[in-house]
């Protein structure tokens, strides 16, 4: 494999033209779309329109005239096909942390009556993204009454940890650190066989890997729009409640946006029918509106095409790092098995933080996660095969020449 081979792969890549829908600075190879997606070119004009026209000129009328009020549902319907959901099942709102709280509380409530009444345990992984665990811990410690979080140490122990006490299994489909992808269908079936509900966090899956929430038997799901969906920093998250669970879905953040008739200004809460009951309060409209610019790009391709290129990019990256940096103490953390891999590749290095800082200084932007993990995200909409070659070449130079500073100061965000 040579750089020319990579250029030939780019020339034959049907997704290559989509890169022009993103504004990336010259000289940057961006391998961190798993943390903050790149900016769709259209976002600048859309922000200008929302701020100057919809807010500046039309003012409060825009809740109706610009469709602000319906935006969480309209964007939810646009996002739905990417995750194997249906119309009227997704809203874009709040944060992933908040949506996890709502979904977990609703799932515990669904179990609290009848046969599920004795179920008081939320099963999740110790390696899950911390906020997922923290939200579960916060909820169970406030509920008391014997509710608790059970942290499982490995995938092999997961099935055995789901038992007659389990109310909800809460898993992140693709692990943020390792890129390991769970078998959603098998684990959902296993949870159901033991009478538990299963809640999937799709933060590192939506827009990255094909998803079939209905076919795979998921009960509830949440996820981010600012990672692979390119919605913008801090863009609102999403929550999926399938039609068959909506009537039983009662969540405690019962704000007026989830009310059956919010402008009746009634003193008592009554949830609306449908997915609207997952809403809480007023959304950050400027940020929410930009989510659409990211979703628009997905209309021009398919998740199958994205997945095929993602696997080709991650295979190439693994192969080139192993060939060209093989003399260095790098450890592959991400599964080689395609079925178990998300759209990122993680390598450990004893000086992972310092090496990543040196890469970033040379324009190869990935990130670092404890312990010693360098994380590289691959986003087929704007990453090319020659980007992969160039990134590995810069990594090779940094490692061979040891041009990294092991005393590098850490920023607040790594
Ligand atoms: C990125 C990520 C989050 C982020 O949650 P916020 O509420 O948006 O800060 C949550 N969970 C997982 C698994 C993530 O990867």
Image (tube, helix red, strand yellow):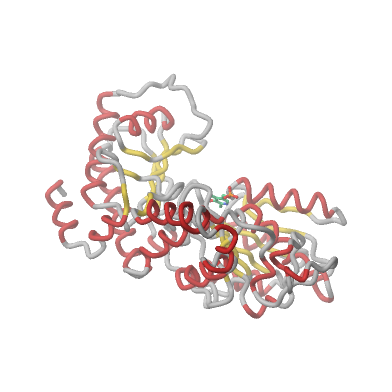
Position of residue 76 in the picture relative to residue 42 (left or right) = right
Vertical comparison of 348 with 80: above or below = above
Give the residue displayed 85% in from the left and 66% down from the top: 267
Vertical comparison of 249 with 366: above or below = below
Q: Nearer the viewer, residue 2 or 251?
A: 251
Which residue in the rendered view is the most extreme toward the front? 57
Which residue in the rendered view is the most extreme toward the bottom? 244
Q: Nearer the viewer, residue 357 or 300?
A: 300
Quadrant of the rendered image containing residue 71: bottom right
Which residue in the rendered view is the most extreme toward the top? 407
Q: Is residue 303 visible?
A: yes
Return the x and y of residue 92 as percentages of the image width and height: 56, 63
Position of residue 177 in the picture relative to residue 377 (left or right) = right
Quadrant of the rendered image containing residue 254: bottom right
Tag count in the figure?
0
Return the x and y of residue 97 as percentages of the image width and height: 63, 52
Give the residue displayed 73% in from the left and 73% down from the top: 261
Vertical comparison of 4 with 186: above or below = above
Return the x and y of residue 70 as percentages of the image width and height: 57, 69
Give the residue displayed 25% in from the left and 27% down from the top: 400
Vertical comparison of 314 with 72: above or below = above
Q: Is residue 173 visible?
A: no
């Amino acid at each position: 494999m040579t750089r020319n081979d990579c250029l030939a792969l780019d020339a034959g890549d049907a997704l290559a033209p989509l890169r022009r829908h993103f504004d990336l600075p010259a000289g940057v190879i961006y391998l961190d779309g798993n943390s903050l997606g790149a900016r769709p070119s259209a976002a600048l004009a859309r922000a200008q329109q929302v701020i100057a026209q919809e807010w500046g000129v039309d003012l409060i009328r825009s809740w109706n005239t610009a469709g602000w009020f319906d935006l969480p549902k309209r964007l939810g319907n646009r996002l739905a096909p990417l995750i194997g959901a249906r119309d009227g099942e997704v809203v874009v709102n709040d944060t992933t942390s908040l949506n996890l709280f709502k979904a977990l509380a609703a799932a515990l409530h669904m179990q609290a009556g009848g046969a599920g009444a004795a179920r008081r345990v939320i099963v999740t992984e110790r390696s899950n993204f911390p906020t997922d665990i923290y939200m579960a811990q916060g909820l169970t410690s406030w509920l008391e009454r014997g509710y608790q979080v059970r942290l499982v140490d490995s995938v092999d122990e997961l099935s055995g940890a789901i038992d007659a006490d389990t109310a909800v299994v809460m898993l992140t489909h693709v692990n943020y650190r390792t890129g390991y992808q769970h078998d959603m269908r098998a684990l959902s079936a296993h949870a159901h066989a033991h009478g538990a509900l299963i809640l999937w966090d799709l933060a590192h899956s939506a827009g990255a890997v094909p998803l079939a929430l209905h076919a795979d038997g998921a009960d509830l799901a949440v996820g981010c729009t600012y990672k692979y969906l390119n919605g913008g920093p801090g863009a609102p998250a999403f929550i999926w409640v399938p039609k068959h669970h909506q009537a039983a879905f009662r969540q405690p953040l019962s704000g007026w946006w989830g009310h059956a008739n919010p402008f009746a200004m009634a003193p008592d809460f009554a949830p609306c029918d449908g997915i609207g009951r997952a809403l809480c309060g007023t959304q950050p409209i400027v940020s929410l509106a930009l989510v659409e610019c990211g979703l628009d790009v997905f209309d021009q391709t398919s998740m199958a095409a994205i997945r095929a290129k993602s696997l080709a990019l991650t295979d190439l990256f693994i192969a080139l790092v192993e060939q060209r940096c093989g003399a260095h103490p790098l450890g592959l953390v991400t599964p080689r098995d395609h079925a178990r891999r998300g759209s990122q590749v993680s390598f450990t290095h004893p000086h992972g933080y310092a090496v990543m800082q040196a890469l970033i200084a040379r324009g190869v932007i990935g990130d670092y996660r404890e312990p010693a993990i360098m994380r590289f995200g691959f986003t087929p909409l704007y990453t090319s095969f020659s980007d992969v070659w160039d990134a590995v070449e810069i990594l090779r130079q940094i490692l061979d020449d040891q041009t990294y500073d092991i005393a590098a100061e850490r920023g607040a965000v790594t």
